[in-house]
Image (cartoon, rainbow, N blue to C red):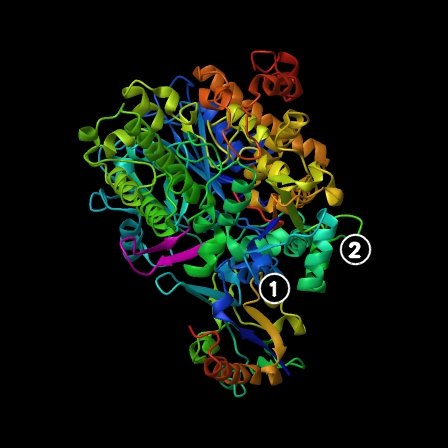
């Protein structure tokens, strides 16, 4: 699947790029693990809650535009065609 | 006074040129807080709801709140209140910067302007010296020129709120701009100022504001500041990227209207007009309004090319209205159009949406090219900027666009293509993809507007709770709460953006210590509900049309994106909303509700 | 010794420093009665907070006819209001304009570093005012070095 990053997640302290292609993960938990291995501890702390059972409080994870919390959370299944978007919590108006 | 208020207002009769200093009505201040609420209360008590907004009988009120100009965070706000010439509803537009606080330091909570002058004037305020002065040399000048000239004339430390030529020449969505770049933008408050031949207010104050319980107040304020600084949005996000950071996420949920909403709400090249792009390429510096710990303001510059320009912004709404809504993905063009709106003092949301509407009318063959003078197609950045500039300068077809999208589309026989509620253009979120915001547009007391109960916060951003944007459940009750809290927040004189990080507890806390009240949080929130109902009562008496949305949102399903196939479920939402409000099925406050709120 | 260091590039022009200063010293909310003032330059997109620099050889202290000005233990040059007669000689003597008079306060005032915990630095949202050991100043020198490094390695040329 395609993974896209936004705002400061694009900075070098996190992903350091706008997007990446990841092919071999089954769900959002695996994706988080894989990206955390690639980008390091700081990314892990953003993606996962401290006990690892949920998303972190400062990340918004969308699968094809739907917020993961309204799907199956970390267990949301992913296919090759999916696009995962990662935003830090932002606001505006 | 030592309760956050200065205890005095100015009453200025522009016809007889008399200026009175009168005591603030403390009973009303207690019931309606300040700024938006108190301004509206004064207005409703003094003006016939059926008044023609363009007539001298309409009044224009500037009002600050008890927290304006204090140590409370983001306390730079004042409200301009009048009957709106665009919507016919109560108009109340809120602005930051430094003007509001300066008015209080000069010793006034607000100013009521009555009648109209025969010749251009401006109001000069230097502490106790208050005079109406000739402004004929300023008439016709834009916001920047007017501000500079007045700073030369009065002194560089005066704070200026003024209108531009658009407001003088019948544009119905002209705002009042203060400190050059900050706008009481929506609903034509500047237009009303123009009808009164009042060009500007220049103010300097050297006095102090005192509060009821200083030490407790200071502590509440500083605790709130620390909370905001620690919050990811108000501490880091907004200052790093400004409001434009929303472009990508709203687009991602399929809620960023494209081509006047006719092409759904997923913009292929949204990233090119995003906050990330703005920060990376065009940002000169961050700017904060008075006392603000958030600092969402941007100074941006397009350094070269056809759209070479510089100014403050753009904010998300303008980024969208001139961008995705016009099918334009050239950030330079978006910035240029936004800066023009600032310079000429008009509302960039209404402007962009009106251009988008004209584009749709043109492409569908309803609006002939000879009327505009050039082809005006979606995606044409140059034509978009040209249309904006001619409206700013009230030239040619710009005079028609200056009436807003509803009156323009009606003239060409297709009012249904105006993306407006109560004739005011809806902002940058599609009510089909985000159900609660659709309800908010429909019920807003000043027509299509996003800052009367910002449902994007729970529905897209997950603040303070996460609500699924596609469903209707839970939205009406949440919206009611948000509307009441927003009315309270606006009326205290602090910025609505603080509510991303703090809530009722903090706002009520600062309010209590400032005014010396011992009311509970709930009693203070009730003032917000009272203000909301007062605005509604005015609109009913004014004969404003019922709460609804443009047919596009109710009947045309979204073609793509996560909300594909959706329309706004307005009637389900409205029924529940009226019940949550304690109103009857027609959306009219019941006697019991009015009694509960001491409004009858 | 710590001193107030200003970083104009970070100042957002919000004047929170003026607010907390006037409140902290005078119990009043009045930016014009503050020991710090923010100057905004719209054209240059710059804002600069300005306050007393606590000179090594303070002119104000030298000229005060009442010997009301002295240096305290945190290094601040402070006014003893028990001795001050409000003659404003110090205001004239300060070459940097960092002593002010306000009609409502009816006295001269200047930055006193809030007894070693300056509120302006504590609450500046942009960290444009910081209160730091002066021996951290060579950091600025280090920045020059780093700039050479960046340019020579082809990074961050702007």
Where residue C112 sits, quadrant-wise, is bottom right
Q: Quadrant of the C terminus of chain B?
A: top right
Is residue B260 or residue B24 the one in the foreground? B260
Magenta-drawn stretch contains B319: no
Please tell me whether residue B299 belongs to the stretch shown in magenta. Answer: yes
Q: CA distance from mark 1 to mark 2?
A: 43 Å
* Whether residue B270 is situated above or below residue C145 in the rendered picture: above
* Label 1 environment density (alpha carbons within 10 Å; few <14, some 14–19, many ≥20): some
On screen, residue C123 above or below B507? below
Say which chain tag 1 marks.
Answer: C
Query: For the image shown, how many numbered marks are present on the structure?
Result: 2
Which quarter of the picture shows residue B219? Answer: bottom right
Are marks 1 and 2 in one subunit? Answer: no
Residue B56, can we see it?
yes
Q: Please provide percent x and percent y for residue B142.
A: 27, 46
B441 or B205, which lies in front? B441
Residue placed at 69% from the left, 31% from the top?
A: B523
Q: Which portion, as a residue range, is magenta?
A: B298-313
Residue under pointer 2:
A50
Residue where numbered disc 1 is placed: C25
Q: Secondary structure beneath disc 2?
A: loop
How far across and how far down the image is residue B175, in percent? 37, 38
| Parent chain of label 2 | A
Mark 2 neighbour density, 10 Å: few (under 14) some (14–19) many (20 or more): few
Label 1 sits on a secondary structure element that is: helix
Task: Tell me if residue B283 can be seen.
Answer: no
């Amino acid at each position: 699947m395609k993974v896209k990053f936004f705002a400061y997640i694009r900075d070098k302290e996190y992903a350091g790029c706008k997007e990446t292609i990841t092919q071999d993960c089954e769900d959002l938990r695996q994706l988080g693990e894989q990206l955390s291995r690639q980008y390091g501890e700081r990314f892990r702390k953003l993606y996962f809650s401290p006990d690892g059972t949920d998303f972190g409080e400062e990340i918004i994870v969308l699968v094809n535009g739907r917020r993961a919390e309204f799907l199956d959370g970390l267990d949301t299944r992913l296919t090759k065609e999916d696009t995962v978007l990662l935003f830090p919590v932002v606001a505006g108006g | 006074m030592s309760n956050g208020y200065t205890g005095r207002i100015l009453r200025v009769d522009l016809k007889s040129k008399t200026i009175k200093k009168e005591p603030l009505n403390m009973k009303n201040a207690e019931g309606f807080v300040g700024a938006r609420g108190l301004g509206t209360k004064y207005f409703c008590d003094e003006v016939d709801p059926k008044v023609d907004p363009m007539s001298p009988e309409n009044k224009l009120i500037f009002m600050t709140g008890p927290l304006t100009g204090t140590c409370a965070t983001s306390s730079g706000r004042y409200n301009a209140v009048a009957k709106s010439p665009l919507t016919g509803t109560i108009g109340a537009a809120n602005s930051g910067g430094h003007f509001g606080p300066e008015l209080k330091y000069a010793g006034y909570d607000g100013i009521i302007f009555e009648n109209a002058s025969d010749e251009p004037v401006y109001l000069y305020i230097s502490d106790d010296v208050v005079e109406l002065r000739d402004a004929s040399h300023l008439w016709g000048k834009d916001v920047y020129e007017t501000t500079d000239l007045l700073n030369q004339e009065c002194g560089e430390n005066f704070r200026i709120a003024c209108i531009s030529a658009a407001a003088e020449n019948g544009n119905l969505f002209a705002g009042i701009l203060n400190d050059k770049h900050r706008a009481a933008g929506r609903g034509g408050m500047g237009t009303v100022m123009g009808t009164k031949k009042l060009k500007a207010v220049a103010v300097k104050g050297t006095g102090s504001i005192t509060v009821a319980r200083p030490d407790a107040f200071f502590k509440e304020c500083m605790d709130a500041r620390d909370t905001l600084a620690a919050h990811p949005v108000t501490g880091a996000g907004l200052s790093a990227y400004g409001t434009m950071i929303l472009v990508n996420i709203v687009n991602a949920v399929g809620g960023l209207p494209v081509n006047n909403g006719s092409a759904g709400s997923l913009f292929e090249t949204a990233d090119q007009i995003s906050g990330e792009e703005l920060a990376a390429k065009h940002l000169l510096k961050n700017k904060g309004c008075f006392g603000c710990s958030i600092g969402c303001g941007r100074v941006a510059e397009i350094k070269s090319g056809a759209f070479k320009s510089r100014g403050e912004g753009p904010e998300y709404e303008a980024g969208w209205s001139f961008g995705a809504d016009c099918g334009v993905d050239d950030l330079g063009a978006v910035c240029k159009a936004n800066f023009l709106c600032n310079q000429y003092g008009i509302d960039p949301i209404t402007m962009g949406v009106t251009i988008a509407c004209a584009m749709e009318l043109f492409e569908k063959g309803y609006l002939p090219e000879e009327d505009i003078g050039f082809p005006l197609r979606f995606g044409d950045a140059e034509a978009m900027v040209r249309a904006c500039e001619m409206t700013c300068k009230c030239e040619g077809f710009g005079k028609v666009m200056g009436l807003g999208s509803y009156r323009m589309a009606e003239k060409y026989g297709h009012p249904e293509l105006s993306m407006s509620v109560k004739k005011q253009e809806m902002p940058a979120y599609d009510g089909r993809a985000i159900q609660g915001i659709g309800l908010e547009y429909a019920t807003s007391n000043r027509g299509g507007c996003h800052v009367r109960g910002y449902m994007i916060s729970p529905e897209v951003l997950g603040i303070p709770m996460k609500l699924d944007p596609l469903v209707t459940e839970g939205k009406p009750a949440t919206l009611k709460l948000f509307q009441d809290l927003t009315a309270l927040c606006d009326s205290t004189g602090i910025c609505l953006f603080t509510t991303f990080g703090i809530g009722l507890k903090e706002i009520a806390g600062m309010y209590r210590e400032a005014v010396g009240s011992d009311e509970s949080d709930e009693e203070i929130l009730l003032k917000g509900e009272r203000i909301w109902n007062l605005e509604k009562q005015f609109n009913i008496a004014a004969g404003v049309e019922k709460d609804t949305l443009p047919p596009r949102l109710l009947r045309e399903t979204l073609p793509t994106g996560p909300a594909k196939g959706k329309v706004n479920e307005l009637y389900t939402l409205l029924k529940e909303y009226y019940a949550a409000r304690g109103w009857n099925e027609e959306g009219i406050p019941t006697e019991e509700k009015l009694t509960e709120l001491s409004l009858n | 010794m710590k001193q107030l260091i200003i970083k104009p590039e970070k100042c957002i022009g919000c004047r929170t420093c003026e607010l907390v200063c006037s409140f902290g010293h005078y119990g009043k909310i009045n930016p014009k009665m503050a020991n710090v003032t923010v100057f905004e330059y719209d054209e240059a997109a710059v804002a600069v907070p300005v306050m007393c620099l606590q000179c090594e050889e303070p002119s104000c202290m030298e000229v005060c006819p009442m010997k009301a000005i002295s240096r305290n233990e945190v290094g601040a040059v402070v006014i003893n209001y028990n001795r001050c007669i409000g003659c404003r000689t110090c205001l004239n003597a300060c070459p940097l304009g960092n002593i002010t008079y306000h009609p409502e306060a009816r006295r001269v005032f200047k930055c006193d570093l809030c007894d070693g915990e300056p509120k302006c630095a504590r609450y500046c949202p942009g960290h444009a005012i910081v209160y730091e050991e002066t021996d951290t100043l060579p950091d600025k020198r280090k920045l020059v070095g780093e700039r050479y490094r960046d340019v020579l390695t082809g990074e961050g040329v702007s």
